Amino acid sequence: MSSLALYRRYRPESFAEVIGQEHVTDPLQQALRNNRVNHAYLFSGPRGCGKTTSARILARCLNCEKGPTPTPCGECQSCQDLARNGPGSIDVIEIDAASHGGVDDARDLREKAFFGPARSRYKIYIIDEAHMVTSAGFNALLKVVEEPPEHLKFIFATTEPEKVIGTIRSRTHHYPFRLVPPGTLRDYLGEVCQKENIPVEEGVLPLVVRAGAGSVRDSMSVMDQLLAGAGADGVTYAMATSLLGYTDGSLLDSVVEAFATGDGAAAFEVVDRVIEGGNDPRRFVTDLLERLRDLVILAAVPDAAEKGLIDAPADVIERMQAQAGTFGAAELSRAADLVNEGLTEMRGATSPRLQLELICARVLLPAAYGDERSVMARLDRIERGVNFSAGGGVGLPALGYVPGPDVHGGAAAGQAQGHAPVPPGGAAAAARAAAW
Protein backbone atom coordinates (compact mmCIF):
# COMPACT_ATOMS: atom_id res chain seq x y z
CA MET A 1 0.00 0.00 0.00
CA SER A 2 1.37 3.39 -1.00
CA SER A 3 2.21 5.82 1.77
CA LEU A 4 0.97 8.75 -0.33
CA ALA A 5 -2.05 10.64 0.96
CA LEU A 6 -5.34 9.53 -0.58
CA TYR A 7 -5.92 12.81 -2.39
CA ARG A 8 -2.49 12.49 -4.05
CA ARG A 9 -2.97 8.86 -5.08
CA TYR A 10 -6.25 9.69 -6.82
CA ARG A 11 -5.38 13.13 -8.18
CA PRO A 12 -6.99 13.50 -11.66
CA GLU A 13 -4.71 13.30 -14.70
CA SER A 14 -7.23 14.53 -17.27
CA PHE A 15 -10.14 16.94 -17.36
CA ALA A 16 -12.54 13.99 -17.66
CA GLU A 17 -11.50 12.84 -14.15
CA VAL A 18 -12.13 16.24 -12.52
CA ILE A 19 -15.48 16.09 -10.70
CA GLY A 20 -18.01 18.85 -10.15
CA GLN A 21 -16.28 21.46 -12.36
CA GLU A 22 -17.84 20.80 -15.75
CA HIS A 23 -18.54 24.53 -16.18
CA VAL A 24 -14.75 24.99 -16.29
CA THR A 25 -13.40 21.79 -17.82
CA ASP A 26 -15.81 21.68 -20.79
CA PRO A 27 -14.93 25.18 -22.12
CA LEU A 28 -11.23 24.51 -21.58
CA GLN A 29 -11.40 21.26 -23.53
CA GLN A 30 -13.29 23.00 -26.33
CA ALA A 31 -10.68 25.76 -26.46
CA LEU A 32 -7.98 23.09 -26.79
CA ARG A 33 -9.91 21.39 -29.61
CA ASN A 34 -10.27 24.70 -31.43
CA ASN A 35 -6.62 25.61 -30.74
CA ARG A 36 -7.75 28.89 -29.19
CA VAL A 37 -5.66 28.79 -26.05
CA ASN A 38 -5.07 32.07 -24.24
CA HIS A 39 -1.66 33.15 -23.00
CA ALA A 40 -2.84 33.64 -19.36
CA TYR A 41 -5.52 32.04 -17.16
CA LEU A 42 -6.88 32.81 -13.71
CA PHE A 43 -8.36 29.87 -11.78
CA SER A 44 -10.20 30.94 -8.63
CA GLY A 45 -12.37 29.22 -6.07
CA PRO A 46 -12.45 27.64 -2.58
CA ARG A 47 -9.57 25.50 -1.40
CA GLY A 48 -9.38 21.88 -2.46
CA CYS A 49 -11.75 22.17 -5.42
CA GLY A 50 -9.24 21.43 -8.20
CA LYS A 51 -7.58 24.71 -9.24
CA THR A 52 -3.94 23.61 -9.11
CA THR A 53 -4.80 20.13 -10.37
CA SER A 54 -6.60 21.63 -13.38
CA ALA A 55 -3.62 23.93 -14.01
CA ARG A 56 -1.33 20.89 -14.16
CA ILE A 57 -3.75 19.08 -16.46
CA LEU A 58 -3.89 22.12 -18.75
CA ALA A 59 -0.09 22.20 -18.86
CA ARG A 60 -0.12 18.49 -19.69
CA CYS A 61 -2.63 19.06 -22.50
CA LEU A 62 -0.61 21.92 -23.97
CA ASN A 63 2.75 20.12 -23.95
CA CYS A 64 1.55 16.67 -25.06
CA GLU A 65 3.30 15.56 -28.29
CA LYS A 66 -0.15 15.06 -29.86
CA GLY A 67 -1.39 18.39 -28.57
CA PRO A 68 -2.55 20.83 -27.81
CA THR A 69 -5.25 18.28 -27.04
CA PRO A 70 -8.11 17.99 -24.53
CA THR A 71 -7.03 14.41 -23.73
CA PRO A 72 -3.30 13.91 -23.04
CA CYS A 73 -1.90 10.72 -24.54
CA GLY A 74 -0.14 9.70 -21.33
CA GLU A 75 2.66 8.05 -23.32
CA CYS A 76 4.96 10.85 -24.47
CA GLN A 77 7.81 12.09 -22.28
CA SER A 78 6.01 15.30 -21.35
CA CYS A 79 2.86 13.43 -20.25
CA GLN A 80 4.92 10.99 -18.18
CA ASP A 81 6.86 13.83 -16.55
CA LEU A 82 3.61 15.59 -15.59
CA ALA A 83 1.78 12.42 -14.54
CA ARG A 84 0.42 11.89 -11.03
CA ASN A 85 3.66 10.37 -9.74
CA GLY A 86 5.95 11.83 -12.37
CA PRO A 87 9.20 13.69 -11.67
CA GLY A 88 7.90 16.95 -13.12
CA SER A 89 8.92 18.89 -16.20
CA ILE A 90 11.63 21.51 -16.41
CA ASP A 91 9.33 23.55 -18.67
CA VAL A 92 6.40 23.63 -16.23
CA ILE A 93 7.39 25.78 -13.26
CA GLU A 94 5.18 25.90 -10.17
CA ILE A 95 5.67 28.90 -7.91
CA ASP A 96 4.18 29.37 -4.46
CA ALA A 97 3.42 33.07 -4.33
CA ALA A 98 3.11 32.93 -0.54
CA SER A 99 6.91 32.76 -0.34
CA HIS A 100 7.84 34.18 -3.78
CA GLY A 101 5.48 37.12 -4.19
CA GLY A 102 7.85 40.05 -3.93
CA VAL A 103 9.08 42.40 -6.65
CA ASP A 104 12.53 40.75 -6.76
CA ASP A 105 10.93 37.34 -7.38
CA ALA A 106 8.79 38.85 -10.14
CA ARG A 107 11.84 40.41 -11.80
CA ASP A 108 13.69 37.09 -11.64
CA LEU A 109 10.70 35.31 -13.20
CA ARG A 110 10.45 37.96 -15.93
CA GLU A 111 14.11 37.56 -16.87
CA LYS A 112 13.92 33.76 -17.07
CA ALA A 113 10.57 33.72 -18.88
CA PHE A 114 12.03 34.92 -22.18
CA PHE A 115 14.26 31.85 -22.48
CA GLY A 116 12.57 29.21 -24.60
CA PRO A 117 11.41 25.81 -23.30
CA ALA A 118 14.06 23.08 -23.01
CA ARG A 119 12.08 20.11 -24.40
CA SER A 120 8.40 21.01 -24.60
CA ARG A 121 6.16 23.13 -26.79
CA TYR A 122 5.48 25.77 -24.15
CA LYS A 123 7.09 27.14 -21.04
CA ILE A 124 4.31 27.31 -18.47
CA TYR A 125 4.31 29.13 -15.13
CA ILE A 126 1.73 27.96 -12.56
CA ILE A 127 1.55 30.63 -9.84
CA ASP A 128 -0.30 29.23 -6.84
CA GLU A 129 -1.82 31.47 -4.14
CA ALA A 130 -1.57 34.32 -6.63
CA HIS A 131 -3.34 36.73 -4.27
CA MET A 132 -0.17 36.71 -2.15
CA VAL A 133 1.82 38.48 -4.87
CA THR A 134 2.39 42.09 -3.84
CA SER A 135 1.15 45.01 -5.94
CA ALA A 136 4.76 45.82 -6.83
CA GLY A 137 5.30 42.19 -7.85
CA PHE A 138 2.21 42.21 -10.08
CA ASN A 139 3.31 45.48 -11.67
CA ALA A 140 6.73 43.98 -12.39
CA LEU A 141 5.00 41.06 -14.13
CA LEU A 142 2.47 43.18 -15.99
CA LYS A 143 4.38 43.67 -19.23
CA VAL A 144 5.34 40.01 -19.67
CA VAL A 145 1.79 38.86 -18.80
CA GLU A 146 0.32 41.40 -21.23
CA GLU A 147 2.63 40.62 -24.17
CA PRO A 148 4.43 37.32 -23.56
CA PRO A 149 6.53 35.53 -26.18
CA GLU A 150 4.82 32.77 -28.16
CA HIS A 151 6.31 29.99 -26.04
CA LEU A 152 5.08 31.39 -22.69
CA LYS A 153 1.85 30.63 -20.78
CA PHE A 154 0.72 31.79 -17.33
CA ILE A 155 -1.80 30.06 -15.04
CA PHE A 156 -2.68 31.90 -11.82
CA ALA A 157 -4.53 29.99 -9.08
CA THR A 158 -6.05 31.77 -6.10
CA THR A 159 -8.75 31.55 -3.45
CA GLU A 160 -9.16 35.35 -3.43
CA PRO A 161 -9.36 36.67 -7.00
CA GLU A 162 -10.41 40.14 -5.83
CA LYS A 163 -6.88 40.60 -4.43
CA VAL A 164 -5.32 40.08 -7.86
CA ILE A 165 -4.90 43.57 -9.29
CA GLY A 166 -7.32 44.52 -12.04
CA THR A 167 -4.64 45.08 -14.68
CA ILE A 168 -3.56 41.43 -14.36
CA ARG A 169 -7.15 40.07 -14.17
CA SER A 170 -8.10 41.94 -17.34
CA ARG A 171 -5.34 40.14 -19.27
CA THR A 172 -6.41 36.63 -18.24
CA HIS A 173 -9.29 34.27 -18.95
CA HIS A 174 -10.97 33.88 -15.57
CA TYR A 175 -12.48 30.49 -14.64
CA PRO A 176 -14.25 30.39 -11.23
CA PHE A 177 -14.24 26.96 -9.58
CA ARG A 178 -17.03 25.94 -7.19
CA LEU A 179 -17.51 23.62 -4.25
CA VAL A 180 -18.45 20.11 -5.33
CA PRO A 181 -22.13 19.12 -4.78
CA PRO A 182 -22.64 16.61 -1.92
CA GLY A 183 -24.17 13.90 -4.14
CA THR A 184 -21.28 14.03 -6.63
CA LEU A 185 -18.72 14.00 -3.84
CA ARG A 186 -20.40 11.09 -2.05
CA ASP A 187 -20.42 8.96 -5.22
CA TYR A 188 -16.77 9.76 -5.84
CA LEU A 189 -15.77 8.80 -2.28
CA GLY A 190 -17.72 5.56 -2.66
CA GLU A 191 -15.69 4.70 -5.78
CA VAL A 192 -12.44 5.46 -3.96
CA CYS A 193 -13.42 3.17 -1.06
CA GLN A 194 -14.20 0.38 -3.49
CA LYS A 195 -10.77 0.76 -5.09
CA GLU A 196 -9.19 0.65 -1.63
CA ASN A 197 -11.12 -2.60 -0.86
CA ILE A 198 -12.19 -1.38 2.58
CA PRO A 199 -15.89 -1.73 3.53
CA VAL A 200 -17.59 1.45 4.69
CA GLU A 201 -20.81 1.31 6.70
CA GLU A 202 -23.84 3.12 5.36
CA GLY A 203 -24.11 6.59 6.84
CA VAL A 204 -20.34 7.21 6.98
CA LEU A 205 -20.00 8.89 3.58
CA PRO A 206 -22.58 11.63 4.34
CA LEU A 207 -20.56 12.46 7.47
CA VAL A 208 -17.35 12.67 5.45
CA VAL A 209 -19.01 14.87 2.83
CA ARG A 210 -20.33 17.13 5.56
CA ALA A 211 -16.89 17.36 7.18
CA GLY A 212 -15.29 18.17 3.82
CA ALA A 213 -17.80 20.99 3.17
CA GLY A 214 -17.62 20.60 -0.61
CA SER A 215 -13.83 20.46 -0.85
CA VAL A 216 -12.58 17.31 -2.57
CA ARG A 217 -9.15 17.51 -0.95
CA ASP A 218 -10.58 18.03 2.55
CA SER A 219 -13.07 15.19 2.08
CA MET A 220 -10.33 12.88 0.81
CA SER A 221 -8.16 13.77 3.82
CA VAL A 222 -11.00 12.91 6.20
CA MET A 223 -11.68 9.67 4.32
CA ASP A 224 -7.98 8.81 4.41
CA GLN A 225 -7.97 9.21 8.19
CA LEU A 226 -10.99 6.94 8.58
CA LEU A 227 -9.58 4.29 6.24
CA ALA A 228 -6.26 4.36 8.09
CA GLY A 229 -8.02 3.56 11.37
CA ALA A 230 -10.40 0.96 9.95
CA GLY A 231 -10.52 -2.43 11.65
CA ALA A 232 -11.60 -5.83 10.38
CA ASP A 233 -15.16 -4.56 9.92
CA GLY A 234 -14.03 -1.56 7.89
CA VAL A 235 -15.15 1.96 8.72
CA THR A 236 -18.16 1.87 11.04
CA TYR A 237 -20.66 4.64 11.71
CA ALA A 238 -19.79 4.68 15.42
CA MET A 239 -16.09 5.08 14.62
CA ALA A 240 -16.79 7.91 12.16
CA THR A 241 -19.01 9.88 14.55
CA SER A 242 -16.51 9.47 17.36
CA LEU A 243 -13.46 10.41 15.31
CA LEU A 244 -15.10 13.34 13.48
CA GLY A 245 -16.76 14.67 16.62
CA TYR A 246 -20.33 14.43 15.35
CA THR A 247 -23.22 13.67 17.64
CA ASP A 248 -24.46 10.10 17.66
CA GLY A 249 -27.79 9.78 15.87
CA SER A 250 -29.45 8.16 18.88
CA LEU A 251 -28.90 11.32 20.97
CA LEU A 252 -30.48 13.46 18.26
CA ASP A 253 -33.42 11.06 17.98
CA SER A 254 -33.92 11.18 21.74
CA VAL A 255 -33.92 14.96 22.05
CA VAL A 256 -36.17 15.46 19.00
CA GLU A 257 -38.68 12.95 20.36
CA ALA A 258 -38.53 14.71 23.74
CA PHE A 259 -39.35 18.02 22.01
CA ALA A 260 -42.21 16.39 20.10
CA THR A 261 -43.80 14.87 23.21
CA GLY A 262 -42.97 17.71 25.60
CA ASP A 263 -40.94 15.36 27.80
CA GLY A 264 -38.65 17.67 29.75
CA ALA A 265 -37.11 14.86 31.77
CA ALA A 266 -35.97 13.05 28.62
CA ALA A 267 -34.59 16.25 27.06
CA PHE A 268 -32.48 17.18 30.08
CA GLU A 269 -31.31 13.58 30.42
CA VAL A 270 -29.95 13.85 26.86
CA VAL A 271 -28.15 17.06 27.84
CA ASP A 272 -26.56 15.20 30.76
CA ARG A 273 -25.49 12.36 28.45
CA VAL A 274 -23.94 14.87 26.05
CA ILE A 275 -21.90 16.52 28.79
CA GLU A 276 -20.95 13.32 30.62
CA GLY A 277 -19.92 11.72 27.33
CA GLY A 278 -17.39 14.48 26.74
CA ASN A 279 -19.21 15.83 23.66
CA ASP A 280 -18.90 19.48 22.70
CA PRO A 281 -22.23 21.21 23.52
CA ARG A 282 -21.82 23.59 20.60
CA ARG A 283 -21.26 20.68 18.22
CA PHE A 284 -24.37 19.01 19.62
CA VAL A 285 -26.46 22.15 19.02
CA THR A 286 -25.05 22.45 15.49
CA ASP A 287 -25.98 18.83 14.74
CA LEU A 288 -29.41 19.35 16.32
CA LEU A 289 -30.01 22.34 14.07
CA GLU A 290 -29.04 20.20 11.06
CA ARG A 291 -31.56 17.57 12.16
CA LEU A 292 -34.33 20.15 12.61
CA ARG A 293 -33.52 21.55 9.18
CA ASP A 294 -33.99 18.07 7.70
CA LEU A 295 -37.30 17.70 9.55
CA VAL A 296 -38.55 21.06 8.28
CA ILE A 297 -37.75 20.00 4.72
CA LEU A 298 -39.35 16.56 5.19
CA ALA A 299 -42.48 18.15 6.61
CA ALA A 300 -42.75 20.40 3.55
CA VAL A 301 -41.48 17.89 0.96
CA PRO A 302 -42.31 14.27 1.95
CA ASP A 303 -40.21 12.85 -0.92
CA ALA A 304 -37.19 15.07 -0.13
CA ALA A 305 -34.86 12.06 0.01
CA GLU A 306 -35.78 10.96 -3.52
CA LYS A 307 -35.25 14.51 -4.79
CA GLY A 308 -31.81 14.70 -3.21
CA LEU A 309 -32.71 17.46 -0.74
CA ILE A 310 -31.59 15.30 2.20
CA ASP A 311 -28.48 13.14 2.27
CA ALA A 312 -28.86 10.33 4.80
CA PRO A 313 -29.19 6.51 4.93
CA ALA A 314 -32.62 4.98 4.29
CA ASP A 315 -33.20 3.97 7.94
CA VAL A 316 -32.37 7.49 9.15
CA ILE A 317 -34.72 8.99 6.56
CA GLU A 318 -37.48 6.67 7.78
CA ARG A 319 -36.95 7.75 11.39
CA MET A 320 -36.90 11.42 10.45
CA GLN A 321 -40.14 11.07 8.48
CA ALA A 322 -41.79 9.64 11.58
CA GLN A 323 -40.36 12.45 13.71
CA ALA A 324 -41.54 15.13 11.26
CA GLY A 325 -45.05 13.70 11.49
CA THR A 326 -45.14 14.23 15.28
CA PHE A 327 -44.60 17.99 14.96
CA GLY A 328 -46.86 20.70 13.68
CA ALA A 329 -45.37 22.98 11.02
CA ALA A 330 -45.29 26.04 13.29
CA GLU A 331 -43.94 24.04 16.22
CA LEU A 332 -41.09 22.62 14.14
CA SER A 333 -40.19 26.01 12.67
CA ARG A 334 -40.16 27.58 16.13
CA ALA A 335 -37.87 24.87 17.50
CA ALA A 336 -35.41 25.40 14.64
CA ASP A 337 -35.45 29.19 15.17
CA LEU A 338 -34.79 28.84 18.90
CA VAL A 339 -31.95 26.36 18.40
CA ASN A 340 -30.41 28.67 15.79
CA GLU A 341 -30.63 31.64 18.16
CA GLY A 342 -29.18 29.55 20.98
CA LEU A 343 -26.26 28.48 18.77
CA THR A 344 -25.40 32.14 18.20
CA GLU A 345 -25.61 32.87 21.94
CA MET A 346 -23.26 29.96 22.73
CA ARG A 347 -20.29 31.71 21.12
CA GLY A 348 -18.00 32.64 23.98
CA ALA A 349 -20.45 31.38 26.61
CA THR A 350 -18.79 30.60 29.95
CA SER A 351 -21.25 27.78 30.68
CA PRO A 352 -22.15 25.88 27.51
CA ARG A 353 -24.19 23.34 29.48
CA LEU A 354 -26.37 26.08 30.92
CA GLN A 355 -26.92 27.54 27.44
CA LEU A 356 -27.87 24.09 26.12
CA GLU A 357 -30.36 23.56 28.95
CA LEU A 358 -31.89 26.98 28.33
CA ILE A 359 -32.34 26.13 24.65
CA CYS A 360 -34.20 22.94 25.61
CA ALA A 361 -36.36 24.84 28.12
CA ARG A 362 -37.36 27.43 25.52
CA VAL A 363 -38.32 24.79 22.98
CA LEU A 364 -40.30 22.79 25.55
CA LEU A 365 -42.26 25.73 26.99
CA PRO A 366 -44.01 27.78 24.28
CA ALA A 367 -46.57 28.81 26.92
CA ALA A 368 -43.89 30.91 28.62
CA TYR A 369 -43.77 33.24 25.60
CA GLY A 370 -46.44 35.42 24.03
CA ASP A 371 -44.89 35.92 20.62
CA GLU A 372 -46.69 34.80 17.47
CA ARG A 373 -44.56 31.73 16.77
CA SER A 374 -45.07 30.44 20.33
CA VAL A 375 -48.84 30.93 20.04
CA MET A 376 -48.82 29.03 16.74
CA ALA A 377 -46.73 26.25 18.30
CA ARG A 378 -49.24 25.92 21.17
CA LEU A 379 -52.06 25.92 18.65
CA ASP A 380 -50.34 23.08 16.79
CA ARG A 381 -50.17 21.07 20.01
CA ILE A 382 -53.82 21.69 20.86
CA GLU A 383 -55.04 20.80 17.38
CA ARG A 384 -53.08 17.56 17.46
CA GLY A 385 -54.82 16.74 20.75
CA VAL A 386 -51.62 15.61 22.43
CA ASN A 387 -51.45 15.82 26.23
CA PHE A 388 -48.08 17.23 27.34
CA SER A 389 -48.35 16.55 31.03
CA ALA A 390 -45.46 17.14 33.39
CA GLY A 391 -44.21 13.82 34.68
CA GLY A 392 -47.35 12.08 33.43
CA GLY A 393 -49.25 12.95 36.62
CA VAL A 394 -53.02 13.00 36.45
CA GLY A 395 -54.59 16.41 36.90
CA LEU A 396 -51.41 18.39 36.23
CA PRO A 397 -51.62 21.25 33.76
CA ALA A 398 -50.25 20.69 30.28
CA LEU A 399 -46.77 22.03 29.53
CA GLY A 400 -47.76 23.20 26.07
CA TYR A 401 -50.81 25.24 27.07
CA VAL A 402 -51.91 27.32 30.02
CA PRO A 403 -55.54 28.54 29.85
CA GLY A 404 -56.31 32.17 30.49
CA PRO A 405 -58.43 33.26 33.47
CA ASP A 406 -61.46 33.85 31.30
CA VAL A 407 -61.70 30.24 30.17
CA HIS A 408 -61.44 28.43 33.54
CA GLY A 409 -64.18 25.91 33.91
CA GLY A 410 -64.82 25.83 30.15
CA ALA A 411 -63.80 23.47 27.40
CA ALA A 412 -60.27 24.82 27.35
CA ALA A 413 -59.78 23.98 31.01
CA GLY A 414 -60.96 20.46 30.39
CA GLN A 415 -58.51 20.18 27.53
CA ALA A 416 -55.63 21.42 29.72
CA GLN A 417 -56.48 18.82 32.37
CA GLY A 418 -56.50 16.01 29.81
CA HIS A 419 -60.29 15.58 29.82
CA ALA A 420 -62.69 16.25 26.95
CA PRO A 421 -61.06 17.52 23.74
CA VAL A 422 -61.44 21.10 22.63
CA PRO A 423 -64.59 21.38 20.46
CA PRO A 424 -64.19 22.38 16.79
CA GLY A 425 -63.27 26.02 16.50
CA GLY A 426 -62.34 26.25 20.17
CA ALA A 427 -58.60 25.67 19.74
CA ALA A 428 -57.87 29.03 18.14
CA ALA A 429 -59.89 30.86 20.78
CA ALA A 430 -58.11 28.94 23.54
CA ALA A 431 -54.70 29.77 22.09
CA ARG A 432 -55.56 33.45 21.77
CA ALA A 433 -56.77 33.45 25.33
CA ALA A 434 -53.55 31.81 26.48
CA ALA A 435 -51.45 34.41 24.67
CA TRP A 436 -53.15 37.22 26.54
Image: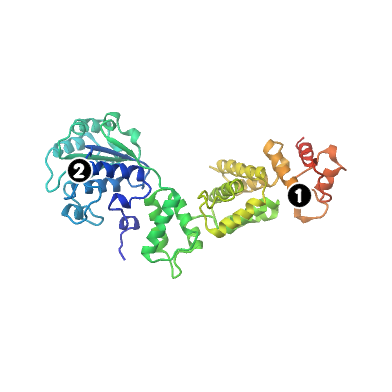
Q: Quadrant of residue 392?
A: bottom right
Left or right? Give the position of 74 relative to 420: left
Relative to residue 136, is residue 155 depicted above or below? below
Above or below: residue 149 compared with residue 336: above
The type of residue carrying mark 2 is Ile
- Left or right: 275 in relation to 426: left
Q: Position of residue 70 (x, y in %)?
A: 25, 47
Q: Residue furthest right?
A: 409
The disc placed on residue 326 is none
Q: Which mark is residue 124?
A: 2
Extreme-front residue of the structure: 34
Disc 1 residue type? Gly
- The image quadrant that residue 38 belongs to is top left
Quarter of the picture holding the N terminus? bottom left
* Residue 276 visible in rendering: no
On screen, residue 171 above or below 318: above
Q: Secondary structure at mark 2?
A: strand
Judged left or right of residue 407, residue 199 is: left
The answer, for residue 339, to whether it is visible in the render is yes
The residue pinned by badge 1 equals 385
